[in-house]
Image (tube, grey):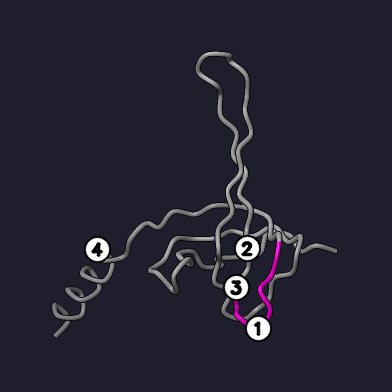
Amino acid sequence: MSENIENTETVAKATQRHRRQLTGEVVSKVPKSKTAVVKVTRTYLHPQYRKYVRRSKKYMTHDENDTTEVGDIIVIEECRPVSKRKRWRLRSIVRKNI
């Protein structure tokens, strides 16, 4: 019996995936749809000019409890498709906008 329990635990641990996580700022909320638009900014070194370039991208994020507000800094993680454009969900709120 204990072998069976240990076996299912190892299978469960093996099936857990490491999902990508990004940190960004909530730039808009879609009313009554549990959706937040998050802007993630990244910097990289330009290969030719050796100058740091800032690029940003917006992600539609699923916010199950509708807890975020515009200006919050949040962590999002990749998940299965929730809708046509939503493939990310809210992981945690780093800092609330005051």
What residue lies at 60% left-to-right and 52% top-to-bottom?
A: 23
Q: Give the amino acid at mark 1.
A: Lys
In this figure, which residue is indicated by the disc labeled 3?
A: 35
Magenta stretch: give its range.
28-35
The front one of 80 and 32 is 32
Disc 2 residue type (three-letter): Val
Label 1: few (<14), some (14–19) or many (≥20) C-alpha neighbours in 10 Å: few
Are discs 4 and 1 less than 8 Å apart at CB?
no
- Residue designated by label 2: 37
Cα–Cα gap, marks 4 and 2:
32 Å
Q: Residue, x 73% and y 59% (percent of image)? A: 95
* Image quarter (top left, top right, bottom left or bottom right) of the C terminus: bottom right
Q: Residue furthest front?
A: 84
Left or right for 67, reference 80: right
Q: Are marks 3 and 4 in contact (CB under 8 Å)?
A: no
Q: Is 29 colored magenta in this rendering?
A: yes
The x, y position of residue 63, in whole percent, is 59, 74
Instruction: Say which residue appears at 68% left-offset and 79% top-offset.
Output: 31
Q: Of the residues shown, which amino acid type is indicated by label 4?
A: Ala
- The answer to whether 9 appears left or right of 45 in the picture is left
- Separation of marks 4 and 1 at Cα, in angstroms: 37 Å
Q: Secondary structure at mark 1?
A: loop
Query: Which residue is label 1 attached to?
Result: 32
Question: Is the Cβ of the residue at disc 2 closer than 8 Å to that at disc 3?
Answer: yes
Which circle marks residue 14 in the picture? 4
Q: Nearer the viewer, mark 4 or mark 1?
A: 1
Q: How far across and how far down the image is residue 86, in percent? A: 48, 67
Position in image of residue 51 (x %, y %) = 62, 19
Q: Which one is nearer the viewer's eye here, 66 or 96?
A: 66
Q: In the image, 32: left or right of 81? A: right
3 part of magenta stretch: no
Image-quadrant location for residue 14: bottom left
